[in-house]
Image: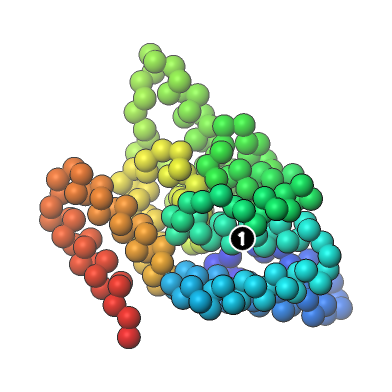
Amino acid sequence: MRHFPALTATLLLLACASAPPPPDWQSQSFAALKSYTSAYLSGNTRVAEVEFERAKAEVARTGRPDLMARIELLRCATEVASLVMKPCAGFAAVAQDAAPAEQAYASFIAGRWDTLQAAQLPTHYRALVTQNQAQAGQTAKPEQGASAPSQNKLHQIEDPLARLVAAGALIQRQPLSSIDLDLAVETASDQGWRRPLLAWLGVQLKRQQTVGEAHAAAKTQRRIDLALQKN
């Protein structure tokens, strides 16, 4: 469970804090979500799709749209971590029954932070959102200039997947600094997550090519070629 965002930790394990064992749908859906996340991040789309449908089937047994909203958010957040940016259609279908915290998380992963209340987000995202909102207010003032900081608070997010989700959300608002981009690349690399690694290496390569860093770009391309190899 370490590699799940904080939101996921509260999705389906509410019964784990009590003495009785969790109901079957809860344990089965959590296992399916864990398998989905692992398969998706490794680049195994077929298995990921099967496991997510299995999780949805288990949650559907409860007749609770709010729980369905949560697992749809998990899927969209995992995609954002891999720089797959598209409307979260699954969540939109059940959004009217989602709690304010889930509504806030949906705005977070879509990069809609301007009016977002950081207190509604999982704790480890709050400092990043607050910092970014403050920076947006400062750059709106011409006399203060519009230079970006050298580093955002991504490094303070300890959970690897949560960090990549935050990086994917942030890049929808502004270009990442080289420091933050390197952090995203190495986070994916350390976990052996092929799909987000290739996505973030692609961004890194484009940045290096744009600024004329030929040596660094060649090294990044070699990393991409290696990550593309499959046994």
The residue singled out by tag 1 in the image is 74
Q: Report which quarter residue 110 is drawn in.
A: top right
Q: Position of residue 36 (x, y in %)?
A: 57, 73
Please indicate, yes or no, whether residue 190 appears anywhere in the rendered image.
no
**Disc 1, SS:** helix
Left or right, residue 152 beside residue 205 = right
In this rendering, the answer to whether 186 lies above or below 140 is below
Q: Residue at the location (63% across, 39% down)?
A: 118
Residue that appears at 36% across and 25% down: 146
Residue 155: image location, x then y, percent: 44, 51
Task: Residue 126: tell me if it is visible.
Answer: yes
Residue in the image at 53% along x and 78% along y = 47
Residue drawn where x is 56% and y is 73% of the image: 49
Residue 12: percent from left, percent from top:
74, 67
For badge 1, the amino acid type reads Leu
Which sits in the foreground, 184 or 60? 60
Q: In which quarter of the image is the C terminus?
A: bottom left
Task: Looking at the picture, tell me which residue is in the foreground, 63 or 35.
Answer: 63
Callout 1 environment at 10 Å: few (<14), some (14 to 19), or many (20+)?
Answer: many
